[in-house]
Amino acid sequence: MLHLDGNTAAAIQLALEDFLPRGAPLPAGIPPDEACLHQQQSYDVMSAPGPEGVVLVQFTPNDAVCPPPPGLSVEARSGKPLLDVTTYAVDVRTMRILSVGVHVRPRS
């Protein structure tokens, strides 16, 4: 069982609704092999407390739920497909999103 305090759960929910709003239609022209990337259940979520009431929420695609499409870019040194990781900074005192960042790293 996983226990989350109310502020952390609320921060995750706020970030998730911004990242992939529930019930939002798929963008036009999405290839079928990328459609699962537009579903909330296709992502792993991690959170960590930050300074002064900020919670960091990170979304990483889960390759077991949504396998990477075959045409992904690869990292030059390792040849591994790249992974987009999205991180939100949420102020739990005001329940506002302070920033959103995306970084790319090789898949493990």
Image (cartoon, rainbow, N blue to C red):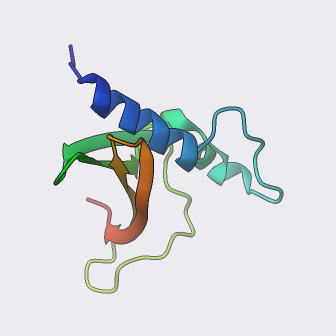
Between residue 40 and residue 52, name the one nearer to us: 52
Residue 22, quarter of the rendered image: top right
Instruction: Estimate the x, y position of residue 77 in percent, counting from the top left.
Output: 26, 85
Instruction: Estimate the x, y position of residue 51 in percent, counting from the top left.
Output: 16, 54
Identified at 73% across, 40% down, the residue is 24
Identified at 46% across, 44% down, the residue is 15
Quadrant in which the N terminus appears = top left
Between residue 91 and residue 35, name the one nearer to us: 91
Identified at 54% across, 49% down, the residue is 19
Count of numbered marks: 0
Q: Is residue 81 visible?
A: no
Tell whether 27 sits left or right of 15: right
Tell whether 21 sits left or right of 27: left
In the rendered image, the residue lying farthest to the front is 94
In the rendered image, the residue lying farthest to the top is 1
Is 7 above or below relative to 48?
Answer: above
Tell whether 62 sits left or right of 25: left
Identified at 39% across, 49% down, the residue is 59
Is 33 above or below relative to 94?
Answer: below
Residue 95, quarter of the rendered image: top left
In the rendered image, the residue lying farthest to the right is 28
Instruction: Estimate the x, y position of residue 28 in percent, counting from the top left.
Output: 83, 56
Between residue 55 and residue 72, name the one nearer to us: 55
In the rendered image, the residue lying farthest to the bottom is 76
Q: Is residue 19 visible?
A: yes
Instruction: Estimate the x, y position of residue 42 in percent, counting from the top left.
Output: 49, 39
Quadrant in which the C terminus appears = bottom left
